[in-house]
Amino acid sequence: ISLLDLMAVRGRIHGSTLRARPLEQKAAAADAVRRHVLPLVARGRIHVPVASTFPMSAAAEAYERFRAGGKFGKIVLVAGS
């Protein structure tokens, strides 16, 4: 996300955690992402930053990378690799 672009439109970023929410709210959030966010990702309007990718066989290494901190982006486990 370009902060300059965000500031230019007086945009906001909101965050939340689903961990403590009831299952129904988690399901509703997943459905909303599927309907509203994934189409934007598919069209290239939203980009998810990826810090590192690992094959499933390296899940322990991926977790250590996650725990180490100092990264910007997601740590992704790739199925079928």
Image (cartoon, helix red, strand yellow):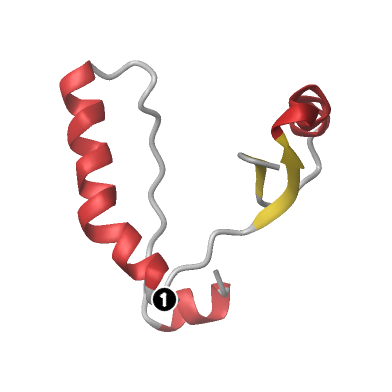
Q: Nearer the viewer, residue 10 or 47?
A: 47
Q: Is residue 34 above or below residue 16?
A: below
Q: What amino acid is labelled 1 in the image?
A: Arg
**Residue occupying the far front of the picture:** 80
Q: Nearer the viewer, residue 79 or 62?
A: 79
- Residue occupying image coordinates x 30% and y 66%: 39
Quarter holding residue 35: bottom left
- Residue occupying image coordinates x 27% and y 39%: 30
- State the SS at label 1: loop
The image position of residue 14, as x and y in percent, is 38, 49
The image shows a total of numbered marks equal to: 1
Image position of 8 (left or right of 37): right
Image position of 52 (left or right of 42): right
Residue at numbered disc 1: 45
Quarter holding residue 67: top right
Q: Quadrant of the C terminus?
A: top right
Q: Is residue 36 above or below residue 78?
A: below
The image position of residue 51, as x and y in percent, is 73, 52
The image position of residue 13, as x and y in percent, is 41, 56
- Residue occupying image coordinates x 16% and y 22%: 24
The image position of residue 22, as x and y in percent, is 22, 16
Q: Quadrant of the N terminus?
A: bottom right
